[in-house]
Image: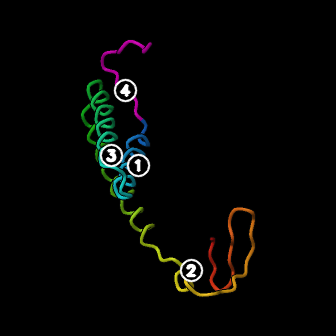
Amino acid sequence: MSPPAVPGRTAFVPWSVPAAGGMALGVATSGGVAIGFAVALAAAAAAAAALVADRGRRTSLRAGATLALAAFAVGALRHELWEARSDPAAPFLEQETRWVGTYDGEWFSATEPVVARL
């Protein structure tokens, strides 16, 4: 059961909530996740923001929306940069190569011919 609303008192939403939602939505849409999931996530975020705005000041809604949009852009850009990184082992595909490194049971950390974690 939620506590009764106090007139003049606003709901508290930490700044990290719209930032995390925006970042997750940016990565999800950049990564090609189904658009239905992204729309559902955006609708849930909008509903939460509307509930907070109904109980509080409009400036907090604008600040949260601005932060969410900025985080969306950062998340999408960061995912695109991660996807565009070069594959260090690409030149060695389809040829017999001797790899030197250590294996920890899960990852092979190569030291030659390139430094990579495979």
Amino acid type of the residue that numbered disc 4 sits on in the rendered structure: Ala
In terms of depth relative to the viewer, which is nearer, 89 or 16?
A: 89
What amino acid type should be assigned to the residue bearing mark 2?
Answer: Ala
Instruction: Give the foreground label among 3 and 1.
Output: 3
Mark 3 and mark 1: Cα distance apart in space: 9 Å
Circle 1 Cα neighbour tier, 10 Å, few/some/many (<14 / 14–19 / ≥20)? some
Q: Residue at x 69, y 80 (%)?
A: 111
Q: Earlier in the sequence, mark 1 or mark 4?
A: 4
| Callouts 2 and 1 close, C-beta under 8 Å | no
Query: Which residue corresponds to mark 2?
Result: 89
Residue located at (27% from left, 30% from top): 50
Instruction: Pick whichever, 47 or 7, lies toward us.
Output: 47
Q: Can residue 72 be seen at all in this image of the molecule? A: yes
Tag 3 near tag 1, CB within 8 Å: no
State which quadrant residue 37 falls in. top left
Q: Position of residue 26 (x, y in %)?
A: 36, 53
The kind of secondary structure element at disc 4 is loop
Task: Tell me the magenta residue range.
Answer: 1-13
Which numbered marker is on residue 47? none
Q: Amino acid at mark 1?
A: Ala
- Residue type, mark 3 in image: Ala
Q: Element type at marker 3? A: helix
Residue marked by disc 1: 24
* Residue 33 x/y as whole percent: 37, 52
Q: Are marks 2 and 3 in contact (CB under 8 Å)?
A: no
Q: Is residue 71 visible?
A: no
Instruction: Say left or right for 117 vs 58.
Output: right
Q: CA distance from mark 2 to mark 4?
A: 51 Å
Residue that mark 4 sits on: 11
